[in-house]
Image (cartoon, coloured by chain):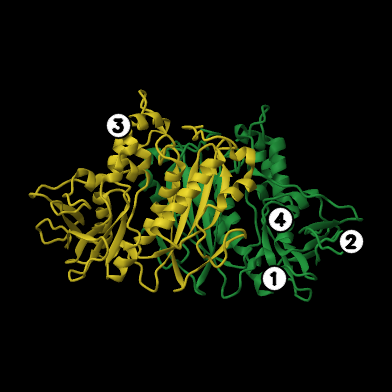
Chain colours: A green, B yellow
C-alpha cells in the first residue's frame, strides 16, 4: 500500500465483495434523471440539441491527493468539481457523470461511502440535477478515481479557447489562490518530521480550521457561470486548473492573441490585487473568459485585462502570442506544471 | 512497482514529461470525427437522435492484466473492446471514447505508444469511424486504464436486459470459451516456479502461439451485431463479460423469466456443443439476446434456447427466475465472479 487507507473500521471492500459494496454505495450517489440509469450495459443520457460535451479527469492517491490530508468526502467532492468545471468552461450545463474507482481490497467500505457522499454534496451544491449514471469498481494496489462528465450546450456553440478577439475584455470568475495557499499550508504544517503527510500534524497545527485548506480539499468553482458566460457572448473560455498565468497562456496561444492582465486590478474575490499565489496557484478551477468590449459581464465575472494583438518585435512582423502582466511595467514570468517532473512517488 | 513495466527502453514518461508524452501518443490514436476533438476543456460529440449511451470500464495492472502476459498493444485493444461491447449490447453504434491512463513515472513512453496502437487497431477493426476524443494522463504507482465509451442508438429504443418475453428465442453471437481457455493456459504454463506470471515461460511453453491465448489477449467481440440485433427486433440483450451462465442469469432476473439453454445445441462458433468452459468462461464479450420467435436472426447470432415463464414450484405460485440448462435433464449450476473475492494482490 502506498500511503495507507483511512482507518475507519470494517468491513473492507475485499470482505464485503463487489456487489454488496455497489449496493451500499449506489444509493448515496446523486441519481439525476437520465433516460436510463445504472444497471444495464450502458446508461442512456439525453442530448436535447443533438450534441454533448465530454471530459475525463483522474485523481490518483499520491500525486493527486493524500488520505492523510483529505477525507473520502473531500476526495469525492474534488473529483466531481474538477470535471464539472471543464464542462462549465465550454459553456455547457452538466448532464451526467460516470465514475470508475480502483480501490485496494483492504479499503474500508465506509471510504467508498464517503467518496459517494462527497460526489453527491458537490453535485447538489454546484450542478443540481446532474447525476452519476454509471460506474465501475475494480481492485488496485493504488486508490484512484476517474470521472467522465457530460454536458448540454443548450443549442449554443461551444465556447472554445481559440475564439478571443483583439479588443475583447478579459475576465475571471471564481477564487484565485486559496487552493494553492491551502496546499502550501499542508506541505508546511501537515507533515511528520520525515516530511510524510500526517493527519495528526494537520489537526495539531490548526490547519484543519484554515479556510484555504478547506478550499484545497473542496474547491468551489463557479460552475453556473459557464453557461451564463456563453449566453452573454463569451468569445473564449477555459478552466483555471493550473493557475491564471499558465492557463491564460494557453488561451492566448490558442487564440493567436496577447492577453494583457492588469495585476493591480481588484481581481480576487476579496478585492485584493493579484499576487504571485493568485497568478500561479492552481486547483481553484475558476473560469477565464473573453467577452466583447460592450458585453455586460455575467455572474461572478470581473474584468482583469484586455485582449491585444500578438506581440510585435517592432519589425512589423507579428510574432509570438503571450501574456503580458502589467504592474509598473515589470513582467511576471509564467512557469509550467508537469505531474511527472514534480512528483516524488515516495512522498505519496 | 507491482509487477514491473515492460522493459522496452528509454525514455520513460517521467523523463519526457506529460506534454511531450501526449504529443507522441495522441497522433497514434484513432481520431474519429467528433464535432470538436481533443485540446480544449471538453470534446463535443454528435448525438443525432438527441440521446447517447455511455459506459465506463477500467483495467488495472494485477487483477485485470499482467505485463508478463500481455503487450501494451494487447492492453489497449482489450480496454477498447470491453467498452465497445457494452455499447453494442444496447444496440448502439460506438461514436466516441475517452481514455484516462495512470502510469508509473518509470514507464517507457513506448508502452503508452503501444497502448495507443492497440486502441487504434481495435477501433479500426471493430468500430471504424469511432475515435478517441479526449483523455487524461496521470502518475500512479499502479498502471491503470479507464475508458468511457459512447454510442448512438440511431433513433431506436435501447435494448435493455429486462425486455425478454416468454416464447422468445434465445440467441448468442460471438465466441464462447477461447478467452477463458487462454487465461487458464497462461496460469498453467506462463508462470515461474513460484507461480508469478513470467513472459519467458509463456514463450518457452509455446503458449504465445496458442489461438486461445491470442483471444484472451485480444478478444474479438461481434460489435457490429449489436445494432443489427436491435434492428432485427431484439427484445433484450447484454454483453457476455462474465460467462454465459452468469450473464444469462442477469438477463433472466432483469426480465422476470426463465431461460432454457439447450447445451447440446451447436452453440459455439466451431459448431461444438456448449461445454463447461463455454458456459462459464468470461471475457469473450459475445452478445446474448432474445428475439421474437418469428424473427430472422441477424449477423452471427445462433439459437441456443428459448424464453420460458418463471420457474414454478408446482403450487401455482410463479417463483424465482432462473437459467435452466437442458442436457439430458441434468442442470448445470451457475457461480459468480467477484474481483475482490478471487484476486490475490500479491500475485499481480
Mark 2 or mark 4, which is nearer the start of the sequence? 4
Q: Residue at x 54, y 50 (%)?
A: A76
In the picture, measured across the screen, residue B57 lies left or right of residue A253, that is left
Q: Nearer the viewer, mark 3 or mark 1?
A: 3
Mark 1 highlights which residue?
A: A234
**SS class, disc 2:** loop
Please give the label number shown on residue B188. Answer: 3
The residue lying toward the viewer, choosing from A34 and A50, is A50
Task: Kindly tell me whether residue A339 is visible in this rendering.
Answer: yes
In the picture, measured across the screen, residue B240 lies left or right of residue B82, that is left
Q: Check the image and name the residue furthest to the left.
A: B328
Quarter placement of the C terminus of chain A = top right
Q: Position of residue B188 (x, y in %)?
A: 30, 31
Please give the label number shown on residue A314. Answer: 2
Label 3 to label 4: alpha-carbon separation:
52 Å
Q: Check the image and name the residue furthest to the top.
A: B193
Mark 4 or mark 1, which is nearer the start of the sequence? 1
Please give the label number shown on residue A247. Answer: 4
Residue count near mark 2 (Cα–Cα under 10 Å), binned few <14, some 14–19, many ≥20: few
Q: How many marks?
A: 4
Residue count near mark 3 (Cα–Cα under 10 Å), binned few <14, some 14–19, many ≥20: some
Q: Are marks 3 and 2 in contact (CB under 8 Å)?
A: no
Label 3 to label 2: alpha-carbon separation:
72 Å
The answer to whether marks 3 and 2 sit on the same chain is: no
**SS class, disc 1:** loop
Label 1 to label 4: alpha-carbon separation:
17 Å
Amino acid at each position: 500500500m502506498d500511503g495507507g487507507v483511512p482507518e475507519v473500521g470494517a468491513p473492507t471492500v475485499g470482505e464485503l465483495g463487489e456487489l454488496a459494496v455497489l449496493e451500499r454505495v449506489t444509493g448515496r450517489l446523486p441519481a439525476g434523471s437520465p433516460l436510463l440509469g445504472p444497471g444495464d450495459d450502458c446508461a442512456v443520457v439525453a442530448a436535447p440539441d443533438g450534441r454533448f460535451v465530454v471530459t475525463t479527469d483522474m485523481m490518483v492517491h499520491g500525486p493527486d491527493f493524500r488520505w492523510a490530508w483529505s477525507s473520502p468526502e473531500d476526495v469525492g467532492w474534488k473529483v466531481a468539481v474538477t470535471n464539472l468545471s471543464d464542462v462549465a468552461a465550454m459553456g455547457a450545463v452538466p448532464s451526467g457523470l460516470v465514475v470508475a474507482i480502483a480501490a485496494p481490497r483492504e479499503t474500508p467500505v465506509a471510504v467508498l461511502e464517503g467518496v459517494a457522499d462527497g460526489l453527491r454534496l458537490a453535485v447538489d451544491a454546484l450542478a443540481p440535477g446532474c447525476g452519476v449514471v454509471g460506474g465501475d469498481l475494480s481492485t488496485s494496489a493504488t486508490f484512484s478515481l476517474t470521472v467522465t462528465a457530460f454536458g448540454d450546450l443548450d443549442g449554443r456553440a461551444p465556447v472554445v479557447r481559440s475564439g478571443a478577439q483583439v479588443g475583447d475584455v478579459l475576465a475571471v470568475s471564481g477564487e484565485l489562490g486559496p487552493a494553492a495557499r491551502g496546499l502550501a499550508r499542508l506541505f508546511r504544517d501537515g507533515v511528520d518530521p520525515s516530511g510524510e503527510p500526517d493527519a495528526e500534524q494537520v489537526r495539531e497545527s490548526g490547519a484543519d480550521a484554515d479556510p484555504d485548506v478547506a478550499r484545497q480539499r473542496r474547491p468551489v468553482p463557479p460552475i453556473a457561470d459557464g453557461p451564463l458566460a456563453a449566453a452573454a457572448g463569451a468569445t473564449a473560455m477555459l478552466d483555471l486548473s493550473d493557475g491564471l498565468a499558465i492557463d491564460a497562456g494557453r488561451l492566448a496561444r490558442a487564440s493567436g492573441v496577447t492577453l494583457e492582465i492588469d495585476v493591480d486590478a481588484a481581481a480576487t474575490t476579496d478585492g485584493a490585487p493579484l499576487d504571485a499565489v493568485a497568478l500561479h496557484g492552481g486547483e481553484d478551477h475558476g473560469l477565464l473568459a473573453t467577452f466583447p468590449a460592450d458585453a455586460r459581464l455575467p455572474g461572478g465575472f470581473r474584468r482583469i485585462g484586455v485582449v491585444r494583438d500578438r506581440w510585435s518585435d517592432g519589425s512589423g512582423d507579428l510574432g509570438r502570442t503571450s501574456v503580458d502582466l502589467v504592474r509598473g511595467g515589470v513582467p511576471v514570468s509564467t512557469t509550467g506544471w508537469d505531474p511527472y517532473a514534480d512528483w516524488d512517488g515516495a512522498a505519496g
